[in-house]
Image (cartoon, grey):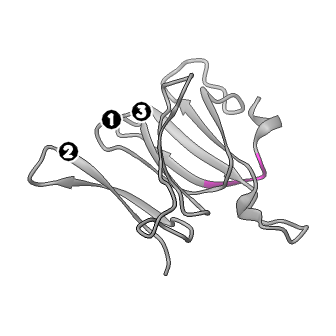
Amino acid sequence: GLALSAPDGVTAVSWNCTGAIVAAAYGVLDSAEGSNWAAHKSVLCAWSTTRRSLNPSKADAVIELADSVACLAFHPEEPTLLAGGSYNGDVLLWDVSNDEEPLLYKSTLSDYTHHEPVTALAWVRQLSKAQHQLVSSAPT
């Protein structure tokens, strides 16, 4: 269950566009050993809040992550698409309804990607097209 696998602290939370799913990222917020706490494994959990049998200690989706997540943002129109920004600079996209392969996209390190923690994500509607674009920010 969640209680056995989740690290100590919540690092990010997001509700989906319908209010029916809440996602939380769990990670180590501080490391007593002085090691790189942001590189510790993390867990992404999602709950369907409309189920009668909702159990906060048993998430509907549990995704183990290699690095801690700093921010989350559900897509404004696609209720199961969730973007995440990690402390190592990765931007990720998951389909939390897909039990087999939830990860749809992960950025790769290049001159044009983040090299520092991604601290904010936002889905921005493109006026010329009927779609949204994911934008991210990180300190420089």
- Where residue 57 sits, quadrant-wise, is top right
* Residue highlighted by disc 3: 80
* Residue highlighted by disc 2: 131
Neighbor class of circle 2 (other Cα within 10 Å; few <14, some 14-19, many 20+) is few
Identify whether 90 is placed above or below 77. below
Residue 125 shown in magenta: no
Q: Nearer the viewer, residue 72 or 66?
A: 66
* Residue highlighted by disc 1: 78
Q: Amino acid at mark 1?
A: Glu
Q: Secondary structure at mark 1?
A: loop
Q: Amino acid at mark 2?
A: Gln
- Sequence-wise first label, 1 or 2: 1
Q: Secondary structure at mark 2?
A: strand
Q: Report the residue at 61% width, 18% height from top.
A: 53
Which disc number belongs to residue 14?
none
Type of secondary structure dominating the magenta stretch: strand
Identify whether 36 is placed above or below 78. below
* Labels 1 & 3 near each other (Cβ < 8 A): yes
User: In whole angstroms, how far apart are the C-alphas of marks 3 and 2?
Assistant: 16 Å
| Mark toward the viewer: 1 or 2 | 2
- Magenta range: 7-11
Q: Report the residue at 69% width, 28% height from top.
A: 58
Residue placed furthest toward the top? 52
Give the percent coordinates (x, y) of residue 60: 60, 26
